Amino acid sequence: MARYAVKLAESPLIAEPGARASYSQAGFNLAGRIIENVTGTTFEQAVTSLLSEPLGLAHSRYAVNDVITRRFAVGHNTDTNGVLAVARQWKDNRADNPGGGVVTSASDLLRWARFHLGDGRIETGERILPTELLHRMREQTVELHGSTLGDAFGICWFPRTVDGVATITLGLLPGDTDEYIVTAGGLQGQRGFFARDESGAVTGIDLAGRLLALVR
């Protein structure tokens, strides 16, 4: 990750800072390197100690060696002939972990969703994040124009208004309707999401295109 940050500094800018907004894997990865510098540990260890362990995310892992020693569903993509095939390459290098490298389970994703729908406290009542900071992630930092991602950038969220209903999202999955707006993320051939609207917490877990759970 340190080497990635050095190479990133050598990359040309596509625009001057503040001139335009763009969804950026590189930006998340750089944030991960900043976390390493601040905490004095690796990004993965910081996430584990600060988030995964307090939240009880026992099945969320970054390292390939940790994943393959557990029950793991390999991802699939449709090939050029319309036939499902095992997705390869499954994962690149750990420099991309901050922008989307964690492997998790449906139960862990539900725990993560409940935390974001709460006030910064975990199930024991211990507070691991101030309420205002957690909720600030949903608020607009910069407006987007003509983007399919949302109306604005939050912090890892895209605020979006659909038929007068305020939502937070990270893009729509194929086949989605306005009944719920999703936050999605995935690796090769795999995807997970949860959704939220202002009328009440609606959380869905999607693995391999199949809706597994809805909670309010």
Image (cartoon, helix red, strand yellow):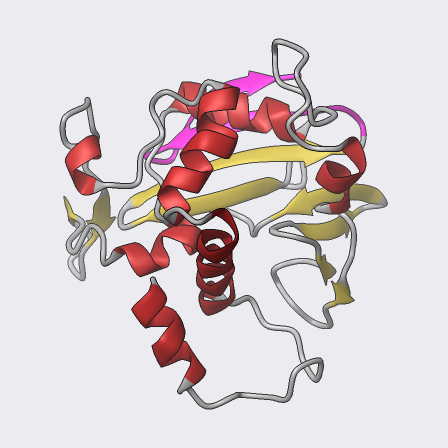
Magenta stretch prevailing secondary structure: strand
Judge whether residue 92 can be spotted in this image.
Answer: yes
Coordinates of residue 127 in the picture (x, y in percent): 68, 22
Q: Nearer the viewer, residue 63 or 194?
A: 63
Q: Is residue 35 above or below residue 110?
A: below
Count of marks placed on residues: 0
Coordinates of residue 35 in the picture (x, y in percent): 50, 52
Residue sitting at x 45%, y 68%: 26
- Examine the structure image and report whether residue 33 is included in the region drawn in magenta: no
Q: Which residues are magenta?
A: 199-216
Q: Quadrant of the C terminus?
A: top right
Image check: 172 left or right of 196? left
Image check: 56 left or right of 155? left
Q: Nearer the viewer, residue 16 or 127?
A: 127
Judge whether residue 192 can be spotted in this image.
Answer: no
Coordinates of residue 143 in the picture (x, y in percent): 77, 67
Q: Is residue 132 above or below residue 89?
A: above
Q: Nearer the viewer, residue 6 or 162?
A: 6
Residue sitting at x 46%, y 55%: 32
Q: Is residue 125 above or below residue 106?
A: above
* Quarter location, residue 64: top left
Looking at the image, the residue that sits furthest to the front is: 40
Q: Is residue 186 above or below residue 125?
A: below
* Quarter location, residue 63: top left
Image check: 195 left or right of 84? right
Coordinates of residue 98 in the picture (x, y in percent): 43, 52
Residue sitting at x 45%, y 31%: 49
Looking at the image, the residue that sits furthest to the top is: 124
- Examine the structure image and report whether residue 204 is included in the region drawn in magenta: yes
Residue sitting at x 81%, y 41%: 165
Looking at the image, the residue that sits furthest to the right is: 164
